[in-house]
Amino acid sequence: MTTPISRRTILAAGAGTAAGLVLPGAAAYAGGHPAASVRFRLDAKVLDGGEQVTSITLDTARLGPIDPASLTTGTFRVHVTATSPIPLAPGDAGVEYDLDRPVTAVRLGHRGSIVIELSYGEGQVGGNTLGYLVSRGRNVLLDLVYTITQTAPIALRNGRSITISSFVQGRLSDPEVDAFSYHVSGSGMKYRLYSPGHAHGSHSSGRRPHPLIVWLHGGGEGASLPDNYYDNETTLRANRGALGFATPEAQRIFSGAYVVAPQSTSFWLEDGPRFAPLIREIVRDLARRYPIDRDRIYVTGASNGGYMSLEMTVVYPNLFAASVAICSVVDSLTPGGPPMITDAQLRSIHTPTWLVASRDDDTVPPEANTVHAHELIPGSLMTLYDHVIWNGHQFPGHWSWIYVARNDPSINGTHIWQWMAQQRR
């Protein structure tokens, strides 16, 4: 019988008693000297298809100088159990997992730490930090419990060998995600904020005004309030939509930009006109508190967020310097129902707009949405891809935000980030 353990529970092995998890074969290490418990960190990275745990860093500096030659892929075994923070419903199969993670390399890291490299990649099961609940249409941050088993002694440079007595799981670390601070607006809407100079100090210059980029997430990254789930996490971990604008390349193009990612309390399409002033409140508050150039505020988003990007330019026609709407919804959500954005509203948009979609999008068909919007929004630009393929991996056609997050769309030699940065209100 197993005992439920949270993400931050102590995971013990060998002689450790905190969780009573025995290290198999520890007694067989005749020359091994037991070492105290070691904390470890989960290192993650957001791929185009979402965040994955790519390695584990053991805090082994105090164990003494380790002989790197003794570290092999057979030194440790890694097991992970991932569970949903929200009870699963029929149709949510495959969200949770319980498996061994293949170890691809073990090496010395900074300051005497040991880094266990794990197999990961687009579409690979078992590394993802998020799970998509079909029953709720939501991504959730999974509760991850990693168990490390040492299967061979570690040699020190002085000739001794050690066996770690227990392993204690620490935090999930993703430098790109962690660069965004946590906030809550006066109206209670949560958001994450990247400030220029956080990781790229050369871009910040005192109180010189900087652009602000507003990223509006897709439907899967909103909250699920009936489940008391409002995490302010999935907006950054589900894709590179917001993160792309915080990369060194984007920061150079925009000469240092703030990037804000509000999180809907449900999904933007539920009630765009109600959410619009809540987003506007965040923009106004940031412009008041930070050195933001009010003539260089940009709005962009994907799917639900693509709709909301256009909605914001309808409701606030003089707020934004440019809008980038990706696989946007403008048509009715139900057959015969009213459109989400009317033709008259689309014709009224005078904010410079660039629309992006893929022809094989079967979630939001481009002809009735992106192409239709392009035909009506005066002076709008459009990039239509045949498929969504990046680094040789083909993604669902709906995921055209991948291209914008990589600054791929271009017209007449001008890429989409450069075009945005050129626009002024």
Image (cartoon, rainbow, N blue to C red):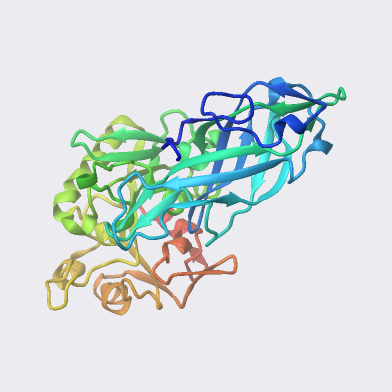
Residue 320 pos. (x, y %): 28, 52
Task: Work out whether 305 lies above or below 231.
Answer: below
Residue 128 percent across, percent down from the top left: 49, 52
Q: Quadrant of residue 56?
A: top right
In terms of image quadrants, where is residue 218? bottom left
Is residue 114 shown above or below 91?
A: above
Depth check, front residue: 164 or 414: 164
Q: Position of residue 53 (x, y in %)?
A: 55, 46
**Which residue sits at x=65%, y=21%?**
36
Judged left or right of residue 165, residue 201 is left
Q: Tell me: residue 63, above or below residue 360.
A: above
The spot of residue 25 in percent (x, y) is 71, 36
Q: Residue furthest front?
A: 1
What residue is at 49 percent from the left and 64 percent from the top?
Answer: 414
* Quadrant for the N terminus in the image: top left
Residue at the far right in the pictured view = 159
Lateral position of residue 175 relative to residue 133, left or right: right
User: Is residue 51 visible to us here?
Assistant: yes
Of 244 and 362, the residue lying toward us: 362
Count of picture labels: 0
Can residue 314 be spotted in the picture? no
- At x 19%, y 44%, the residue is 278
Which residue appears at 41% of the width and 77% of the height? Answer: 360
Which sits in the foreground, 9 or 293? 9
273 vs 390, nearest the viewer: 390
